Image (cartoon, helix red, strand yellow):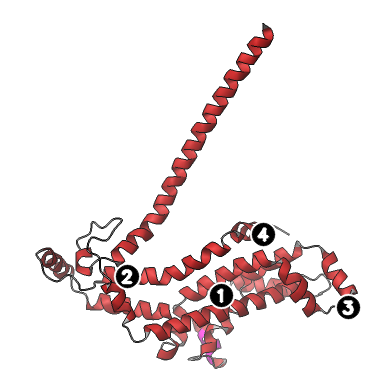
Amino acid sequence: MMNQNKKNEYSTAKTKTTASSILFDVIIYIVLALVVICTVYPFWNTIAISFNEGLDSLRGGIKFFPRKFTLKNYQELFVTPRIFQAGIISVTRTILQTVLSVFSVAMLAYALSRKEFVIKKPLTTILVISMYVNAGLIPGYMLMKNLHLLGRYAVYIVPALVDVFNFILVRTYINGLPDSFVESARIDGANEFRIFIQIIMPLIVPSIAMISLFTAVNAWNSWFDTYLYASNKPKLHSLQYVLMSILQQSQNQSTSATDANSMAIAAGAGASSAKSTPISIRSAITVVATLPILFVYPFVQKYFVVGMTIGGVKE
């Protein structure tokens, strides 16, 4: 009889535990669903507006789908003569800056992770200080001028060769590797460069993938360096700089708020609403600037958790 009572009590407790677990899971899924909606909706709404007729967008009320579908906004972007040249500059810049910066950071991280490198602590301290203390725009501009990089393609590559934050992440990852790998290679007669290429690089692929994404996103989205160092060289204008210029021109050519309301009313009355407006151009620019990164991100997403864990390890 006592055993039967214990079984009943255990069964009741198990049922309560299962019910509470299910309730907790339901609450978690609801919260996650709300977070996903809040995250995805703004971009989805931007896509809907980018495919909607400009004057009709001024009326508002566009949520998930365009009310009057059109490709006019994108056509106005891509008929700009500079857009394709700027796209080539941004693509080549992103690729070169990512490859060269990642390789430079990885080599520097390997060198400053070696225990036998006697001045690694002073050099690391100098690098970390440079991450927190910025000289400012004017000294940076004067440095680029003295290096004869103004108005040259190299101004996009040289200043970004070493990123201190990425260096810290990669060095921390390398410090977590067993020293026996390097020591065995040295016994076999391998030099430092061969050790770095054939042994270290394959072992730090997660950190390489993570900093590659960081570098590529920064390079793709950057426009201020074009404004500072190459604004007088149209052939060196990046895609982001050209898109920003198009948006500014659209805003400057737009009418006042009263005229905008009048245009919206005219559009509702049957007038032509194919004209693009700043809000529709801005939405199209956002989509064009964001899509390339969205295509790349899924391939390196799994490395983010690893990289952030590495960055949080204290030596």
Verify CB contact (< 8 Å) between mark 1 and mark 2.
no
Separation of disc 1 and disc 2 at Cα?
32 Å
Q: Secondary structure at mark 1?
A: loop
* Region of the chain picked out in magenta, as a range: 141-145
Closer to the eye: label 1 or 3: 3
Q: Residue at x 81, y 62 (%)?
A: 178
Regarding residue 132, the answer to whether it shows in the image is no
Crowding at mark 2 (Cα within 10 Å: few <14, some 14-19, many 20+) = many
Q: Which residue is mark 2?
A: 282
Q: Earlier in the sequence, mark 3 or mark 2?
A: 3
- At label 2, the amino acid type is Arg
User: Which numbered dot is residue 189?
Assistant: 3
Q: Give the residue furthest to the left.
A: 269
Q: Say which amino acid is labelled 1.
A: Asn
Q: Secondary structure at mark 2?
A: helix
Task: Say whether disc 2 or disc 4 marks the residue closer to the N-terminus.
Answer: 2
Please give the residue where the numbered disc 1 appears in the rendered image. Answer: 134
**In terms of secondary structure, what is the magenta stretch mainly?**
helix
> Is residue 111 inside the magenta stretch?
no
Examine the structure image and report whether residue 142 is included in the region drawn in magenta: yes
Q: Residue at x 43, y 68 (%)?
A: 291
**At 85% across and 65% down in the image, what residue appears?**
180
Q: Are marks 1 and 4 in contact (CB under 8 Å)?
A: no
* CA–CA distance in space, label 3 to label 2: 59 Å
- Identify the secondary structure beneath mark 4: helix
- Identify the amino acid type marked 3: Gly
> In the rendering, which numbered label is found on residue 310?
4
| Residue 150 position (above or below residue 95) | below
Closest to the camera, between mark 1 and mark 2, is 2
Residue 172 image position (x, y, % from top left): 71, 64
